[in-house]
Image: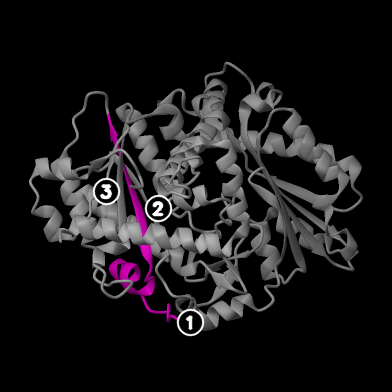
Amino acid sequence: MTDEQKQNIFKTIRISIMVIAVIIICSRVWQFTQALRSQDSLYTTDEGFGVSGLVDRAEDVADAQVDESLVKYTKDINWEYGDPSLYYEDFSDIEKALDEKSNEITEAYFKPKVDFPFYFKTKNQYYLPVLKEIRDGKISMEEALEDPARTIRILSFDMYYWVTNPDRQNFAYNDIASEYYIIQRTKGINGCFYKFYCVIDENINFKEIEESQNAESPIQYLIDNNAKLYTRVMSDNMDGYFCYYDDNGLGNFLKNKYNQEFKPAFFEYSFKEDRAKYYYSVSDPSLKFAATDYGDLYLAVLAQRAMYEEIDKIIEEEGYGGQIAHMSIPNKDNLEMGDENKHYDMSQKYDNRTIVNEVYDGGYDTSLLLLLEEKEEIDYAKLQKISARIQDLFYTNVAEDEEIWYRSELFIYFYTLPKIEQKIVVDLFRRDMITETFFRGMTESIADIYVNMYIVRVETEGFHYLDVRAKKTEFFLDPLGDFETLMSLSKRDFEDRFKTTRLIY
């Protein structure tokens, strides 16, 4: 039996098990599919509850994700990146001056409406073409801010305020804050990220207020001075989230589990989870992850970064650097539940291959996005070597009687766009290399089971950029096998053997 036949059998078994599990466990999903049967011809075959109909439905769902992205982001992406050369220019001085003026406007709005001491720290994201217009003297900063929908891509501020009564900590839920949010949306600012930091102090310390305001990081100053601090977030990217700085023991639990010191992390704009708290390791503050009393994603973010760094190195060494954007999503489909309770001594320093194979012992869904100019030929020899070397990263297995490379589902997509934009896409994927910071939501339908069987897409700006400004071809490759198997193929065999038109077959 060939490796390809074995892999097809494995996938068929995997699909069948998932369908049976969903039918038994999730009656809600069953009801959903019954409704679809009456409405969708994909479900009205004589074969009844067939896999083919579900796969077709999954393909429709996947296409709908891209269509939704186009509707939502086309205007925004084209305005921001219409002149790709601006992405590489330094507008930091203009942005800082705009932040100061925007901060004054926001404070002026709130000042007559509240009766407690407060201040703001603004750090907006501005559209690049407007920054160029200001730099070239075509408009003033005041004129730019008078047209906020055209100027501000994400309105972002931190509000620090002091109250004596704990009942007033929920200012973010106050009509004043809610009204401000609605006003900005009415003005056409769709992206927003407001953080409200409340300090509760029976005797308000005005010296503390002044010193924190002048500190490089007000929030760190308040933490270091043991302020009784509460936070709240309002954003277009998530529901409001109330976060006690007191972690109720979760930090100690993580410390005992990983032999590392952890501290609560503060939200970033990309975080979407509202049922968990976020933490970071003191030894590596760059990796933030969600944690609850039933699990955490520390090992997942470690594994995702390790895979990114190793794949990036392979791509560079094989001569496709700057032309392949990529992401790798850790998954635990094949792990037993008991594995979640393992304890790891993360005070040790592990190399990337050890993290990929042993520290995180799940599987990986990896997507390579090859970026080509019009009429540029695909170098299949490079892709063959890259694919083989990615499979060669693995030396441990998930389950008995499986090939090691079963841990890695590898997909290669092809896009065409100009060279200058290719660099932007690669940079956006590098910026968002860590996506698995939050717990994924529950599956809504059996079609979702299929479309999420292999995670080949995340709603990051890199994908939105490709949706809007690049042309995607209608096929991808799924190289299967270990290093020796893949490298033993001729270039033509590699191309012919793995070209396909469907994600699930």
Q: Earlier in the sequence, mark 2 or mark 3?
A: 2
Check if residue 346 falls in the magenta segment. yes
Disc 2 residue crowd, few under 14, some 14–19, many 20+, Cα 10 Å: some
- On the image, the x and y values in percent for residue 450 come to 45, 50
Q: Secondary structure at mark 1?
A: loop
Residue located 51% across and 32% down the image = 67
Nearest the eye: 40 or 456: 40
Q: Earlier in the sequence, mark 2 or mark 1?
A: 1
Q: Nearer the viewer, mark 2 or mark 1?
A: 2
Left or right: 319, with 325 as reference point = left
Q: Is residue 237 visible?
A: yes
- Above or below residue 281? Residue 444 is above
Residue located 39% across and 36% down the image = 424
Nearest the eye: 52 or 150: 52
Residue located 28% across and 68% down the image = 353
Q: Which residue is mark 1?
A: 259
Left or right: 289, with 180 as reference point = left
Q: Secondary structure at mark 2?
A: loop
Which amino acid is tagged 1? Asn
Q: Quadrant of residue 229?
A: bottom right
Nearest the eye: 169 or 296: 296
Which amino acid is tagged 2? Tyr
Q: Which residue is mark 2?
A: 454
Q: Is residue 267 visible?
A: no
- On the image, the x and y values in percent for residue 387 come to 22, 52
Q: Which residue is mark 3?
A: 478
Q: Nearer the viewer, mark 1 or mark 3?
A: 3
Q: Quadrant of residue 130?
A: top right
Segment tinted magenta in the rendering: 343-372
